[in-house]
Amino acid sequence: MYSVLVLINPLTRNLFDISPGQGYVRRPWIVYTYLIFYAYCAISIVVTVLNKRKIDRNIYHILAAFPILAVLVILVQQRYPNVILSGSAATCALLIIYLHLQNKQISMDYLINVPNRKEFFNMLGLMIKKLPEKQFILVVVSLRDFHQVNNTCGQQKGDELLLCKINA
């Protein structure tokens, strides 16, 4: 609904208008965009809270904080109508989520969801630095020439083998 209102605004000018003499002027239907946005924020909070156990902890915090931040931005925009912030808030929130997901993809193996070699060594270094007197055993499993499994059986079977989903 919000997208439709924004897309038809150049024709109707019911949301806002930008004129040379007056600058940015809010029109009567702008209140509907605020209501849609507040409803979106409320629904986002409810969906996030209901799915808390299914969502990564860091992403949960981002998803829980975004609607609150967005409401604050819209309140500022309502109070100071000459300041246009709603698009900025949404863009920043999406950028934060995107960067977090990209960071996770860089440090985790997408298939088996374990840290990659670089992340493993970072975690190991932190553990040794944090608990230098703690003893531990490190077991390394190396799958040399695993590409031959993929070449022989196919990539899907290779993925299934890594995930231990092979049916005998």
Image (tube, rainbow, N blue to C red):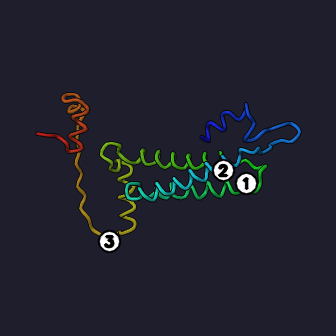
Separation (CA) of disc 1 from disc 3? 57 Å
Name the residue rendered at 38%, 51% in the picture: 119
Mark 3 residue type: Glu
Please provide percent x and percent y for residue 153.
Answer: 19, 30
Q: Nearer the viewer, residue 78 or 158?
A: 78
Q: Residue furthest left?
A: 168
- Camera-near label (2 vs 3) is 2
Q: Is residue 98 above or below residue 138?
A: above
Residue linked to disc 2: 34
Question: Around disc 3, counting alpha carbons within 10 Å, would you say few (fewer than 14), some (14 to 19), or many (20 or more)?
Answer: few
Give the SS element for disc 1: helix
Give the SS element for disc 3: loop
Q: Is residue 125 above or below residue 157?
A: below
- Camera-near label (1 vs 3) is 1
Relative horizontal placement of residue 15, taking residue 70 as reference (left or right): right
Residue linked to disc 3: 133
Name the residue rendered at 34%, 48% in the picture: 117
Mark 2 residue type: Tyr
Residue 107: tell me if it is visible.
yes
Please provide percent x and percent y for residue 168.
Answer: 10, 39
Residue linked to disc 1: 78
Residues under numbered marks 2 and 1 in contact, where contact means CB atoms less than 8 Å apart = yes
Name which of mark 2 and mark 1 comes first in the sequence: 2
Q: Residue furthest right?
A: 21
Question: Around disc 1, counting alpha carbons within 10 Å, would you say few (fewer than 14), some (14 to 19), or many (20 or more)?
Answer: some
